[in-house]
Amino acid sequence: MDEESRVRIDMRVLSRATMLLALLARLHGGPVGVLVVARDGSGDFRSVQEAVDSAPNGNVVIRIKPGTYRELIHIDAASVRLLGTGTGPADVVLTYDLSNGTAGGVSGSTAKSASTTVRGDDFYAENLTFENTFTKTHALTQQGSQAVALRVTGDRAVFRRVRFLGFQDTLYADGKGCDSDKGPCRPARQYFRDCYIEGHVDFIFGDALAFFENCEIHALAHPTVMLTAQSKRYEGEQSGYVFDHCRITAEPGAEKIFLGRPWRSHANVVFLNTSMPKEVQPAGWQEWIHDDTPSLPTVCYAELNSSGEGAQTAQRDPHAKQLTRTEAAQFSVEKHLGGADHWNPKKVAAR
């Protein structure tokens, strides 16, 4: 056997061994590697996207040193973990400043405005910030000011101690896509724990199957603030937002706060055990007319055990519901996100 043939065989063996190690790592739930990102050059990479690109098959932990990383980030691989290594989530900021009007393409480019986009399943983020600064440096206009900090369409995504900073359309918690408005739609489950989410117009939106636990939902100054614009499309779609033991806060100038309006006709949002400031309007929810058709008659908007000056549940819109404790039990983390694989995000670790 000549030398060239031996080299080819050795390379095939090495390639197979590498694939085997990756497979074993996946089977045992461990990462293929740990990468360090640092702006000052003290890590493996200076940018988050460079680190992501270096692991095209995913299954990697990316530890990010304190700093502000101004870059567009796209994560398509599965099992990518981003961990901020600062003392708190404000120490690591992933930021950019595109909007619906500046992201390119035709009108309706809100998705393209996202500073960070996550399509891969089993994504994990902890102790960092996703931000879109467009509205800080541009005047608010009637059209085109939608500016997404994070868009996530991956299934089984977990966010712990993460801040989401923006104004209109801050957090795009979305599904995997639909063939049409009548489906079928492919669900994406997402879990947010101990997070901070701020904005003013429709700033938590999309059709993910999402659960927010012990989070602060902060209304920025605006005449009318819409916390959610959930977009469940049809009765059987696996889509909906649950907020449990959260708190709604408002800065001066956040005049009228609504819990949400229906981006699509079967919007599904539930608030459990949530404190609400006086700026939350007694009606709670606001109509959004689509093609001359009201949406509130077909939504699922519900509450249980709201507290604070904004918890005037007796005056809520008549289409909204006050749940019994038995009814609310169906919206636990395990039941809302479990699925056929019995996924429990509380057991997902950073590794």
Image: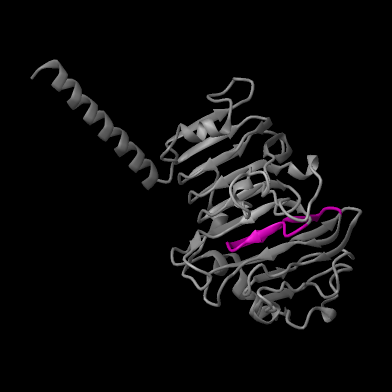
Say which of 253 and 36 sits in front. 253
* Residue 199 shows in this picture: yes
> Left or right: 347 with respect to 137?
left
**137 with respect to 223 (left or right):** left
Q: Nearer the viewer, residue 29 or 255?
A: 255
Residue at position x 44%, y 63% from top?
341
- Whole-percent x, y for residue 146 in the image: 70, 52
- In the rendered image, residue 312, in percent from the top left (x then y), is placed at 85, 75
Asked if one can make out residue 276 in the rendered structure from this viewpoint, the answer is no
Identified at 60% across, 75% down, the residue is 330
Residue 200 screen position, x and y as percent: 79, 56
Q: Is residue 211 magenta?
A: yes
Query: What range of the chain is rendered magenta?
Result: 201-221
* Residue at the extreme right: 252
Residue at the spot 79% in from the left edge and 42% down from the top edge:
138
Q: Is residue 158 above or below residue 240?
A: above
User: Is 342 in the magenta?
Assistant: no
Q: Residue furthest top?
A: 3
Quadrant housing the N terminus: top left
Task: Specify the color scheme.
Answer: one colour
Q: Is residue 196 above or below residue 271?
A: above
Question: Count the marks: how many?
Answer: 0
Position of 272 with respect to 115 (left or right) is: right
Residue 210, placed above or below residue 140? below
The residue furthest front is: 106
> Measuring 55% from the left and 29% from the top, which residue is drawn there?
36
- Note whether 217 is above or below 12 in the view shown: below
